[in-house]
Each structure stands twice: as C-alpha cells, then as structure tokens.
Amino acid sequence: MNVEQEYIKKLSEGDKHAFDALFLLYYPKIKAFIYGFVKNEDDTSDLAQDAFIRVWNNRVNLTKVDSFGAYLFKIAKNIIFDFFRRKSLYEKYALQEVQMNVEEISWELNDVLDAKELEILIYALVDKMPEKRQAVFKMSRNQRLSNEEISEQLGISKRTVETHISSALKELRKFISSIQAIIL
C-alpha cells in the first residue's frame, strides 16, 4: 500500500491529519484547474475548498475509490458545472450545437468525462479566450470555414488566422494536459 492509499484509508476512518496531507497534495492542482474556468481568485478558492468539503463529507466511501486524483477531479468538475448553472451559463453552453473535431486533441480520460461534458468545458474555455481568437476558432471548428475564408471575412491575414487557431489549440491542449495530470 502506498502512502496516498494509506492516507485515504485513514481519512475514511475520520483521521484529520490524513485529510490535511491529501489537501496539501491536491489543493494546488484542483485550484489551478478550477481557476482555468472561473478566472476569479475568490470564487476559485471557495470552489476548491468546496471540493475538499465534499471529500470530507463522503470520506466513509473513499475505500471504494480506485484513483483519488480522478475522484477529486470529478468532484471539481461537478462543482464547476454547479457554478456555471448558478450563473446561467450552463444552459447557454448545453444548448449550443458544437461541431468540434475532438479527435484533433489527443486525450484519454478513463471515463471521467463523457464527450458532452468535455464539449461544455472546452467551449467554456473558448469563451474565455480573446475575442478575435474565439471568433477565428469558432469559424474554423463550428462553421468549418477554411483559413482563407476566415481571413477574407474578418479582414485579417491568413497567417494571423493560423496563429489564432494555433494559440487556441495550444491552450486547449494545455487544459487537457492539466486534466490528465490530475487524473494520473
């Protein structure tokens, strides 16, 4: 049994020191993940703490958890959805028909996220991007326009279009990597 598993076992028995150790290990990762969507330090801190409150409240069930990182990430994901629902953003994103080519981004999330949830999270992230990058990305992925067509419609160079798409994909890949780091 590794140290983390021992902490989980002790936590499931109510050991506050084990909780503190897991909190110190995972809080920065969960906080960074949540901040990527919320973009507000106060809200992020509150939501990250909520994730650990849920862990504490459900500690007796932790012995059934295979991967604490994946479990905690799933809690954080649900908290983010709750946050967006409260802000009425969830309906906006859930109702959008997104035609994103998810295969372009290499990932494997071990059933932590289903495709629709990932789509919602990706478009929440896209909507946080600078306005021009967001427009270019959506025209490319949703409307399936070529770089040349986007260039003509927006009155910018084809190279600028390519730069915006590249930057958007880089940001999305970074997001996917952060999820994988939490799960693994």
Image (spheres, grey):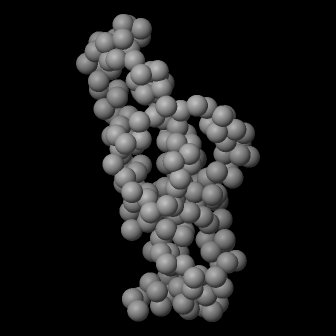
Query: Residue 124 appears at what percent x and percent y?
Result: 55, 40
Residue 77's spot in the image, x, y percent? 57, 57
Q: In this view, does 6 lie to the left or right of 108?
A: right
Q: In which quarter of the image is residue 104?
A: top left
The tally of labels here is 0
Residue at image location 63% in from the left, 58% down from the top: 78
Query: In the picture, which quadrant includes the N terminus?
Result: bottom left
Q: Can residue 121 be seen in this view?
A: no
- Relative height, residue 182 to residue 138 (above, below): below
- Depth check: give the residue in front, 47 or 123: 123
The relative height of residue 32 versus residue 159 in the rendered view (above or below) is below
Residue 14: x and y, percent? 64, 90
**Residue 30 image point, x, y percent:** 51, 62
Depth order, front residue of 7/95 = 95
In this picture, is 169 found above or below 114? above
Q: Which residue is drawn at 64% across and 82% down?
A: 61
Is residue 129 at all visible to an observer of this figure? yes
* Position of residue 172 in the picture relative to residue 9 (left or right): left
In which quadrant is the C terminus drawn? bottom left
Q: Residue at x 41, y 10 (%)?
A: 154
Question: Which residue is at a point 62% across and 74% down the rendered structure image?
Answer: 55
Depicted 56 relative to depicted 30: above or below = below
Q: Which of 128 and 138 is in front in this view?
A: 138
Foreground pick, 107 / 29: 107
